[in-house]
Image (spheres, helix red, strand yellow):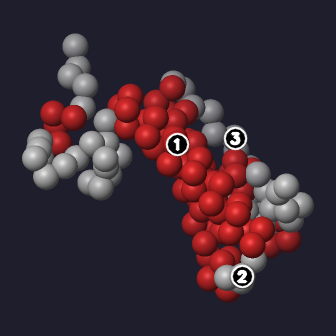
Amino acid sequence: MINDNIFEPYQGFIRGNMFKNLYDQYGKIYDVKPLNEQAELLTYIDVYTFACIDLKLYLDIYEDDKEIINLYNMYSAELKKYMIEYENKYGPLTENSMFLNGDNWNWLSLFPKEV
């Protein structure tokens, strides 16, 4: 069960705060509308990255909050899932990608060739 004081990841992302009691609207909230599958996957990655960072900041102060630890672990697993899906379809996201290894450092060879 998700804490009633915490926004769902996407809602926290577009507001810039995962915590309802700390949220103070300072402008208009805009929905993110991805134009294609690649942009949609990147949006999921951004959403779950934001959620994990915000929850980690909370856990710096309240390190024993089991509910938030479990939520962080759940969101972290979702982030990993979307990153793997993205990299399988579109190539590496970072220099630490699972697609890069010591035997091959040709970054450009990992991306699909344009036709």
Q: Residue at x 62, y 60 (%)?
A: 73
Classify residue 68 as left or right of residue 100.
Answer: right
- What type is the residue that disc 1 sits on? Lys
Q: Residue at x 62, y 82 (%)?
A: 60
- What type is the residue that disc 2 sits on? Asp
Q: Residue at x 26, y 54 (%)?
A: 95
Quarter in which the N terminus is drawn: bottom right
Distance from disc 3 to disc 2, alpha carbons, whole Å, reads 33 Å
- Secondary structure at badge 2 equals loop
**Image position, residue 63 (x, y; %):** 67, 82
Classify residue 57 as left or right of residue 1.
Answer: left
Identity of the residue furthest to the top in this view: 115
Give 80 or 23, whichever is nearer the viewer: 80
Identity of the residue furthest to the right in this view: 4
- Secondary structure at badge 3 equals loop
Distance from disc 1 to disc 2, alpha carbons, whole Å, reads 26 Å
**Neighbour tally class for label 3: few under 14, some 14-19, many 20 plus, Cα within 10 Å:** few
Distance from disc 3 to disc 1, alpha carbons, whole Å, reads 23 Å
Residue at the disc numbered 3: 31
The part of the image, by quadrant, that contains residue 57 is: bottom right
Residue at the disc numbered 1: 81
**Image position, residue 77 (x, y; %):** 57, 51
Residue at the disc numbered 2: 64
Identity of the residue furthest to the bottom in this view: 61
